[in-house]
Amino acid sequence: MKFSGIYAITDDALLPAEQLLQRVELALQAGIALLQYRSKTATREDKQRIASELARLCASYRVPLLINDDPQLALESGAQGVHLGQRDGDIGAARNLLGDDAIIGVTCHASLEKASAAEAAGADYVAFGRFFPSSTKPEASPAELTLLSEAKQKLTLPIVAIGGINPENGAATIAAGADMLAVIQSLWGESDVSSNATRLVSLFRNNS
């Protein structure tokens, strides 16, 4: 895939189970480029069902689905890959399980050293952040936008920026070097997902 555009991440608090598929489809219709299913509260059985439903929905829009933290669930659901935190397992093990074509991303917080290690281990993209105050992860360590410029010079991998990104600050984040913007609150936090997604997606049209 081309790593460019809006990277949407689901959130249990903002997307109740009965609304999840409908609201995700609105975001897909608006042109998001990538979706990550992230749930910290659902049962294993519910995760398997929801992830499989999302995989089918995303496939109909030709948008890859990634699973947060769980390579086995990615395999079982038919997702295209997995996103790993620093404590969520080994890139090589995930690659062995999911295959060469799987998309594997890694959280690197504000560390170029971690990003270089992820690149060497075979990751497909790295994610840095948080760049702005975040209601989803208020405790996350801050990162400076200059990190994106430095990463662009030192890495060959696509770069995802996350943390408090919205239509007002997204353009500056892209200009600093982000290939994709990961969003949660600014997409799902307001009732009009279609409008939110359209505004976010337009950031890349305006910066292309």
Image (tube, rainbow, N blue to C red):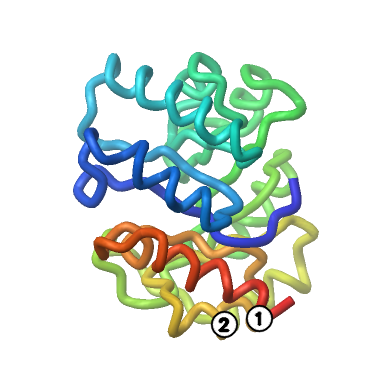
Q: Nearer the viewer, residue 101 or 154?
A: 101
Q: Earlier in the sequence, mark 1 or mark 2?
A: 2
Which residue is at 61% across, 54% downward? 126
SS category of the residue bearing label 2: helix
- Name the side, left or right, on which 174 lies relative to 51: right
Going by the numbered disc 2, the residue's amino acid type is Ala
CB of mark 1 within 8 Å of CB of mark 2? yes
Spatial separation of the CA atoms under disc 1 and disc 2: 8 Å
Label 2 crowd (10 A; few <14 / some 14-19 / many >=20): some
Q: Nearer the viewer, residue 119 or 198?
A: 198
- Name the side, left or right, on which 157 lies relative to 70: right
Tally the marks. Answer: 2
- The numbered dot on residue 9 is none
Q: Nearer the viewer, residue 169 or 142?
A: 169
Estimate the x, y position of residue 199 in percent, counting from the top left.
48, 73
* 189 to 22, vertically: above or below: below
Label 1 crowd (10 A; few <14 / some 14-19 / many >=20): few
Which residue is at 58% across, 73% downward? 202
Which residue is at 68% across, 80% downward? 207
Residue at mark 2: 171
Asked whether residue 1 is in view, the answer is yes
Which residue is at 55% across, 55% downward? 32
- The numbered dot on residue 206 is 1
Task: Tell me the quarter of the image containing the C terminus.
Answer: bottom right
Asked whether residue 138 is in view, the answer is no
SS category of the residue bearing label 1: helix
* 185 to 101, vertically: above or below: below
Residue 165 quadrant: bottom left
